[in-house]
Image: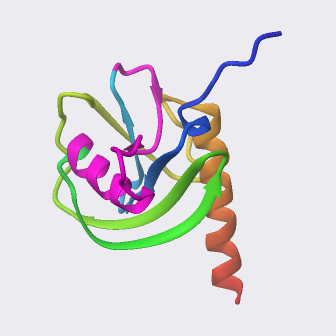
Amino acid sequence: MALISSAYDNRRGSVVVETDKGVLLVSSSGGYYRLPGGKPKKGEASIQTAIRELREETGLRAYYVNYLFKFHASKIFKIRAKGIPTPSNEIHHFAYYKPGKEMDVKVSYNTRKILSKYYGLEEAEAKS
């Protein structure tokens, strides 16, 4: 059985952006949805990558950034951002994830794992 590689297997900065609708997900083709993010440019830190990719993919401007955790080779950040998501050259589709709500789009396996871990952290913080 061959393993299918994931975007999260490579070094990248990925972003959790919570909105009233849920966590923002992006897709270039309308196929599988994932968190905004991407690969770093030469010499770029993961946090810089996350902020840049969010802007490039969605048009959103970050005003608060918090490191959450590492998933495979990716660093996951929570970002609060201003603006309205707008399609770009790379990203043409947006969706929103809320725990317990049925999704009418396909969310990548690793994105679901990241979201589970994220919501587990949120629940732990709420209890403390």
Image point (62%, 62%), residue name: 119
Question: Depth check: 101 or 91 in front?
Answer: 91
Tally of numbered tags: 0
Q: Quadrant of the N terminus?
A: top right
- Residue 128's place in the image compared with 79, above or below, is below
Verify whether residue 49 appears in magenta.
Answer: yes
Q: Is residue 117 visible?
A: yes
Q: What residue lies at 27% left-to-right and 52% top-to-bottom?
A: 52
Where residue 8 appears, as percent x and y from the top left, is 57, 39
The residue located at (31%, 58%) in the rendering is 51
Q: Tell me the magenta residue range.
A: 29-57
Q: How is the image coloured?
A: rainbow
Measured from the top left, where is residue 98 in percent x and y?
51, 52
**Residue sitting at the far top:** 1
* Residue 44 among magenta residues: yes
Residue 100 seen in the current view: no
Estimate the x, y position of residue 12 in percent, counting from the top left.
48, 45
Q: Is residue 120 left or right of residue 32?
A: right
